[in-house]
């Protein structure tokens, strides 16, 4: 065996060839074992290596096995080594994934919560500006023209916000409420501020309601399996009081909104006076602004819905794209460290329920909105790497053998590998104070 090279590539189900990664196999085995009480990561590594050896013995030198062939071999190794319970979990997982793929295959692409037309536009813009790949971004850096890329990306985003404001104006006077929503760290707050400014240029008076102030006291929040408080579920918000206040505001009444202190986890009722006049629009900047029960008391015709997401289209040398959620994770890891007093690895380990809540309460509404904003900035990736890259080796070391932290391990490994080939940019002085990225890295001209 020693004279045989390791497997270098595999064939995915769609026929593309990607680099082989034994660690992914070991992680899948470990997750299956953890589901039946196993905690031995080293054993999972040995079983993955044995599967690799069997593949080489079966298919010979230079083989490029398929995903299915690898998974078949894993099942055989598990059964042969007496790990029947783990094998059953692994087999069941394969079956569930197969059913999910079949279900997706029968869908119409435009209904799969993916805005294909918008993504295509983003990709074309990135290609035209030579920032669709890690290599392209690195060239901007090595040429000394990185500030030009920053300016171009910020300008594109500003233009999208301005176009959204124009769409709102066309819907007047029927529209009385603008909802700007999207998943965590997509840039909702900055987009709201900039949308306000654009509408104000057209003589409109704007008034924002801070939905974060409607959180229940922390001890009333749901918890996860680790005992962590869940800020991500909409049910951590007082939805009944929100609707009561929204109805009163649109009827011209004054309300007193609560105040929530994130440091103490306590809410105080009837603190901030708020009234909406006839010539004002009510703006809602909320993670769950599109969640039905959030504004169910207000007729749909009176609402304009804006959805914001990091629809990034940057890929590495293997053709793998930076995932939208991973981009947002990086942003939040930085922001939480100075805004919520959380260490970056705490944000990483909590992210499993950020995603759980997004997939249930936010992302399904992307096809129901009136306007879509792409907040991804290709230039942010080398800046985020410089600020966060050193945390990922620690995450891999800490969570690799922890059966309860496999989601964090897998995510950290994926992000770390994507960032690996990017040239880090330590100096963020080229990012203007009014840039959306300042919402996350600090130094913004806006008050959040």
Image: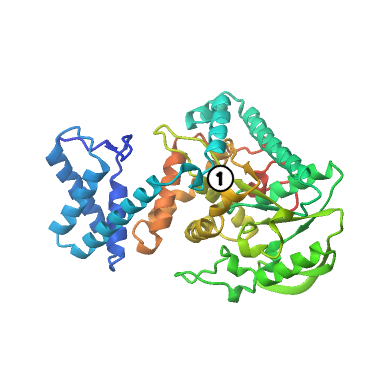
Q: Residue furthest top?
A: 143
- 221 shown above or below 361: below
Which quarter of the picture shows residue 379?
top right
> Who's the residue at 40% across and 60% down the image?
405
Q: Position of residue 304 (x, y in %)?
A: 70, 50
Tag 1's secondary structure? helix
Q: Where is residue 28 in the image (x, y as percent from the top left)?
A: 30, 54
Q: Return the residue at label 1.
A: 387
> Who's the residue at 45% across and 45% down the image?
415
> Who's the residue at 58% across and 29% down the image?
125
Q: In which quarter of the image is the C terminus?
A: bottom right
Q: Position of residue 363 (x, y in %)?
A: 54, 53
Which quarter of the picture shows residue 254?
bottom right
> Who's the residue at 70% across and 35% down the image?
159
Q: Where is residue 342 in the image (x, y as percent from the top left)?
A: 57, 60
Q: In which quarter of the image is the N terminus?
A: top left
Which is more toward the observer, 136 or 86?
86
Q: Residue furthest bottom?
A: 219
């Amino acid at each position: 065996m020693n004279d045989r090279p390791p497997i270098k590539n595999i064939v995915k189900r769609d026929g593309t060839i990607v680099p082989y990664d034994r660690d992914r196999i070991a992680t899948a085995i470990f997750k299956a074992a953890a589901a039946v009480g196993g905690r031995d990561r080293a054993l999972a590594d040995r079983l993955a290596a044995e599967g690799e050896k069997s593949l080489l013995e079966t298919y010979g030198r230079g083989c490029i096995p398929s995903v299915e062939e690898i998974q078949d071999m894993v099942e055989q190794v598990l059964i042969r080594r007496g790990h029947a319970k783990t094998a059953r979990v692994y087999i069941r997982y394969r079956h569930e994934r197969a059913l999910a793929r079949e279900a997706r295959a029968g869908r119409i692409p435009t209904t799969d919560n993916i805005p294909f037309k918008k993504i295509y536009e983003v990709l074309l813009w990135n290609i035209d500006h030579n920032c669709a790949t890690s290599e392209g971004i690195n060239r901007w850096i090595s040429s000394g023209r990185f500030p030009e890329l920053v300016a171009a990306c910020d300008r594109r985003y500003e233009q999208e916000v301005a176009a959204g404001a124009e769409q709102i104006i066309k819907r007047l006077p029927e529209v009385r409420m603008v909802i700007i929503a999207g998943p965590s760290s997509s840039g909702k707050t900055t987009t709201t501020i900039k949308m306000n400014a654009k509408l104000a240029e057209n003589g409109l008076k704007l008034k924002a309601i801070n939905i974060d102030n409607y959180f229940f006291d922390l001890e009333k929040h749901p918890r996860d399996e680790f005992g962590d408080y869940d800020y991500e579920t909409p049910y951590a918000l007082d939805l009944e009081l929100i609707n009561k206040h929204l109805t009163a505001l649109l009827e011209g009444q004054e309300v007193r909104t609560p105040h929530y202190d994130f440091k103490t986890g306590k809410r105080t009722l009837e603190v901030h006076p708020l009234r909406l006049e006839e010539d004002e629009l009510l703006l809602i900047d909320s993670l769950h602004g599109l969640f039905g029960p959030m504004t169910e008391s207000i007729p749909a015709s009176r609402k304009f819905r804006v959805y914001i997401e990091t629809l990034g289209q940057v890929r590495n040398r293997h053709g793998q794209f930076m995932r939208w959620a991973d981009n947002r994770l990086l942003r939040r890891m930085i922001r939480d460290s100075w805004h919520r007093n959380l260490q970056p690895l705490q944000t990483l380990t909590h992210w499993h329920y950020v995603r759980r809540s997004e997939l249930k309460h936010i992302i399904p509404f992307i096809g129901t909105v009136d306007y879509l904003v792409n907040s991804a900035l290709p230039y942010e990736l080398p800046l985020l790497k410089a600020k966060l890259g050193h945390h990922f080796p620690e995450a891999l070391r800490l969570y690799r053998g922890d059966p309860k932290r496999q989601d964090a391990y897998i995510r950290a490994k994926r992000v770390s590998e994507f960032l690996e080939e990017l040239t880090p940019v330590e100096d963020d002085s080229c990012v203007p104070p009014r840039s959306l990225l300042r919402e996350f890295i600090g130094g913004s001209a806006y008050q959040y």
